[in-house]
Image (spheres, helix red, strand yellow):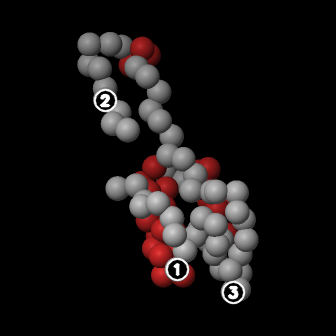
Amino acid sequence: MLWTLDLSRSWRDQPPVPAIASPCINLCRLDRDNRHCTGCGRSLDEIAAWQAASDADKRAIIREAAERLRVAGSVRPEPMP
């Protein structure tokens, strides 16, 4: 989804910037080493930090989690750019 800014309108009249969705798929199980969730691929630290993370940090977490799942042989949709 592409978000655009309408410069002819006040900032108060702009639509809200869409939030980056959590990669959680409600399949919360830790791997054998208790390091990463086998559902979303995030570490416990990444899960705990998600709400306060910047959009750039969230994108990085999603990319890293997707790579962890790929290496582990799990199938997930491609991460956001």
Is residue 54 placed above or below 46 in the rendered structure?
A: above
Q: Where is residue 65 in the image (x, y as percent from the top left)?
A: 51, 69
N-terminal of the pair, mark 2 or mark 1, is: 2
State the CA–CA distance, disc 2 to disc 3. 43 Å
Question: Mark 1 is on which residue type?
Answer: Gly
The N terminus: image quadrant: top left
Q: Tag on residue 4?
A: 2
Do labels 1 and 3 touch, CB within 8 Å?
A: no
Left or right of 43 on screen, residue 11: left
**In the image: residue 24, left or right of residue 77:** right
Task: Tell me residue 21's x, y (percent).
Answer: 54, 47
CB within 8 Å, label 2 to label 1: no
Q: Residue at x 26, y 13 (%)?
A: 8
Residue 5 position by quadrant:
top left
Q: What element carries label 1?
A: loop
Report the amino acid beneath label 3: Asp
| Mark 2 vs mark 1, CA separation in Å | 37 Å
Q: Name the residue under label 1.
A: 73
Q: Nearer the viewer, mark 1 or mark 3?
A: 1
Bin the neighbour count of mark 2 within 10 Å (Cα to Cα): few under 14, some 14-19, many 20 and up: few
Mark 2, secondary structure of its residue: loop
Between discs 1 and 3, the one toward the N terminus: 3
Query: Closer to the observer: label 2 or label 1?
Result: 1
Whether residue 24 is situated above or below residue 29 in the rendered picture: above
Q: Residue furthest bottom?
A: 33
Q: Distance between the residues labelled 1 and 3?
A: 16 Å
